[in-house]
Amino acid sequence: MLPRQTPARVLGLVASLALAASALAQEFDAKIKREVLDEVQSTLTTRAYVGGVRFSQWKDHEAKYFDRLDAAGSPEAFAAVVNGALAEFGVSHAALIPPSMAGEGRASVVGIGVSVRFTNDGGLRVLRVLDDSPAAGAGLSPGDVIIQIDGAAPKDPAQLEGEPDSKVEVRVRKLSGQRLDLSLTRRLIITRTPATLTVFDESGSKVDLPPGARISDDRRLFGLIRLPTFANEYSQPEIKAIFRRCMGLSGLIIDLRDNGGGAVVYMQHFLSFLLIADQPIGVAVSSEMAAQYVEATGGDPSDVVKVAAWSDDPITVPANPIRPFPGPIVVLLNRGSASASELSAQALRELHDAKICGHTSAGALLVSITLPMPGNFVLQVPISDYVSAQGVRPEGVGISPDIQPSRTPTHPGLDPDVDAALNALLAETDPTRQNP
């Protein structure tokens, strides 16, 4: 039986999720559950902050889910129930990560090529599908839910891993509700997807542009930068090399689809190639900032837009020896674009007049930290709200596109989002266009 709540201590910040996974495994029992819940309670009430959200209500949420927490028989099932209780707050970046998933970020794995997380009903929701993987070949997509592995309900995401060339049978519930039975062959998957640059001409045909190649003044070429993450896999030398090759291009498409975000420092590095140094791009509103705002103005601390407008401590663009790209930009977003991706897109929209193409983003734009919990769990907790330089708060709303892809692409071979973005760049750089 799960013990009721007792006082708990607050743990410190860890550098990465992998650190928690390196500890020795602990037995999962009612004592561990209670310790985790106590730490969640303490952390939420002392560290978490989102404008207008009362994290002190955690005790009520825990009581509501008590029977399910008590019945959870595995770390994964327990984390899924805790995450259901955390979802009651209606904010992003609040999640308990079980030990089996705390070590994500490995450079390679033998599996099917998906990143997953337990749902409240015990399935595994697909968060990411790696290109050229068994899962991609079988048609799995973010949002699909794996409801069976080898004929039984999932118990551990590690069941999707195994020996090279071994088979795993999965039953999948698609977003449409359709159920599929798939037989997948595990293989070595390189989990890091590099950032890439693809160059197109006016017809949408790919162009081989070697590093250092000079582009003639009368030729319009356009670059598509695909950036899969702002997390630890982000490579600053790789991004710098890509932007060096962009010199002389007429316009850029920045593809942030399915980019779930990552570290603010990497986002700032990326934006330094696109925006003028020292430009404020937004404000991370913390509980301390809100308290200072109340003391100085007597205003409402839950109004994060007003707190941000009052603050003199914005997030800025760092200096970069390579001058910012001067041409027009279109940013591609979808429901998998979150956090640092949304921040980047909004900054480019406001400060570079970039257009957004595709679909509304996730609306998950809070600054968070990860903390080790008892039993090798990891807690992600939001510590700051976010407001853009022009007073936009995308949390819970997302960033809506300016450009909708057409069902009949103009350029054969390009996906609809890229096609629509290229058409926008062609129109904006049309030499016959009359300036007002």
Image (cartoon, rainbow, N blue to C red):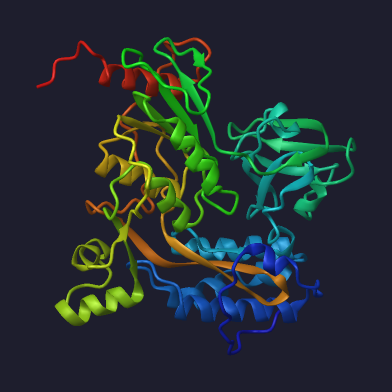
Classify residue 246 by image quadrant: top left
* Left or right placement of residue 203 versus residue 13 in this view: left
In the image, is residue 60 above or below residue 125? below
- Locate residue 249, reporting x and y percent: 38, 25
In the image, is residue 188 above or below residue 157? above
- Quarter of the image with the N terminus is bottom right
Along the line of sight, the residue nearer the viewer: 280 or 178: 280
In the image, is residue 396 above or below residue 197? below
At horizontal 88% and vertical 39% (from top left) the residue drawn is: 164
**Tally of marks:** 0
Residue 422 seen in render: yes
Along the line of sight, the residue nearer the viewer: 213 or 158: 213
- Quarter of the image with the C terminus is top left
- Locate residue 312, reporting x and y percent: 22, 68
Classify residue 3 by image quadrant: bottom right
At horizontal 29% and vertical 40% (from top left) the residue drawn is: 349
At horizontal 27% and vertical 67% (from top left) the residue drawn is: 313
- Locate residue 351, reporting x and y percent: 25, 44
Along the line of sight, the residue nearer the viewer: 318 or 434: 318
At horizontal 49% and vertical 57% (from top left) the residue drawn is: 263
In the image, is residue 118 above or below residue 404? below
Residue 229 seen in render: no
* Left or right placement of residue 5 versus residue 287 in this view: right
Specify the farthest residue to the bottom.
7
- Locate residue 150, reporting x and y percent: 85, 42
